[in-house]
Image: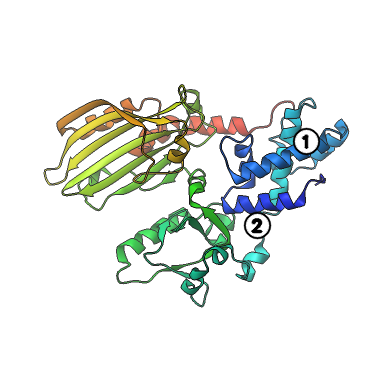
Amino acid sequence: MQSLPINQNKVNALIKQCKHLNVFPIFLSYYYPATEPNPVSDLLTELIEEAVQYLSIMTNGEIEALVDSFPPGVKMFVERGSASNEFLASIALYYLVVVVQANYISLKQIISGDTSQSEVIKTYPELEAKLDFDGLLVIDDNFKLFDGGIAYKDHILHYHQFLRREFSSNPNFDFLRRFIRYYISTRSKNEFRIAIDHHRLMPREFFRHIGEMDAWFGPLFDRSKLDDPYAVGLTIVKRIRPSIFDMTNRLDRTEFYWSYKDGVKTFEVEEISSGDYSFDSYFLNRYAHGERDIQQQILRHFDGAVKVYLQSDYSARLASQMPSEKKSHKKIKLFRIDGNIDIEEWTELLALFFKGNEMLIEYFNPEQFEEKFGERLRRYRSSKSMPSDSD
């Protein structure tokens, strides 16, 4: 590929931040223009501005030759147009996508196993004592395991590159979830160890970026486990974009959380609006709550509300998840039912209350979701990924 003489130190810093925050090169378009403070957005903006300066003094033929040198999978995203700043910024963005992609993963570095420049040990030298002779991290109560990483103090430790799908994508969530589940259930009698990536270290406030790449986190709804006190925890359903549902409302995800205490299972669901979907500087998230008495096997309570978040606080809600979510500015309750509530009626009322939120159907009835929306969504995404007629 042809090259632009942009600042290489800044390019290296961008690659480093992309790795730390688990930002894959092809998703750099989500970080420009910046919608919130982010190390990737900051560096990307500076580099695009620099690249545009070089592009602005190039001829149309030189620009065309540069774009034609992009790999086909990147070139298809470049919309051709006049030499406006917006057009040049788009070329600069995808030029950087190619540059970052070419330097994103070093198999030589991974295979060498050299930890002398470990970002993890540099920040937390005490963790060196928790590595065994194979370099595996011995897991104990100082760590909290998620399928997207390991929480330790102010950071998330990434799993080893070879614990990622095809060694290059997101973590192997299926394996890691099973591993974590078994760790939780048997840690009193078994010892667990796992490999980490020493060249990545994510500040906790950016942990949501791992979740943004996958559609599911957590178990499917299982009606047979309604009265199982151990069938608890968080499920997150993401809206995969591009999505036809964004035409109605722009939602990032929906969180479903089950907990248990004193014979009662509590259910909470909150839809999480995207950071650009506000109303007069307020973010409004629909929320529902229910209580199941597992001794009497009845759903005894059900209510719905809207949680109101201030614009200044909403980034904290986007970055958090139940049960440790950022609290809302105000909760306005909209309905409540008490007694012995029929489960069929409950699921129907939930779906209707969250009208326009397809993720409710995806959680409660994935077969119905696939039958109703699956093929339509795939056609829509395919059409959006096709190059324009002018290409």
Question: Residue 159, position in %: x, y?
Answer: 51, 60
Residue position marked by numbered label 1 in the rendering: 52
Q: Name the residue under label 2.
A: 105
Who's the residue at 44% across and 36% down the image?
Answer: 313
- Res. 210 visible in picture: no
What residue lies at 44% left-to-right and 54% top-to-bottom?
Answer: 147
Residue drawn at 59 percent across, 47 percent down = 23
Instruction: Kindly identify the amino acid type of the residue bearing the numbered disc 1.
Output: Val
Find out whether the residues at labels 2 and 1 contact each other: C-beta distance under 8 Å: no
**Against 383, is 238 above or below?**
below
Q: Quadrant of residue 138?
A: bottom left
Q: In this view, does 182 lie to the left or right of 273?
A: left
> Would residue 11 be visible to someone looking at this image?
yes
Q: Is mark 2 on a helix, strand or loop?
A: loop
Q: Nearer the viewer, residue 351 or 376?
A: 351
The relative height of residue 166 versus residue 300 in the rendered view (above or below) is below
Say above or below: 232 vs 348: below
Percent position of residue 40, x then y: 62, 45
* Left or right position of 318 against 50: left
Q: Kindly state the secondary structure of the residue where label 1 is placed.
A: helix
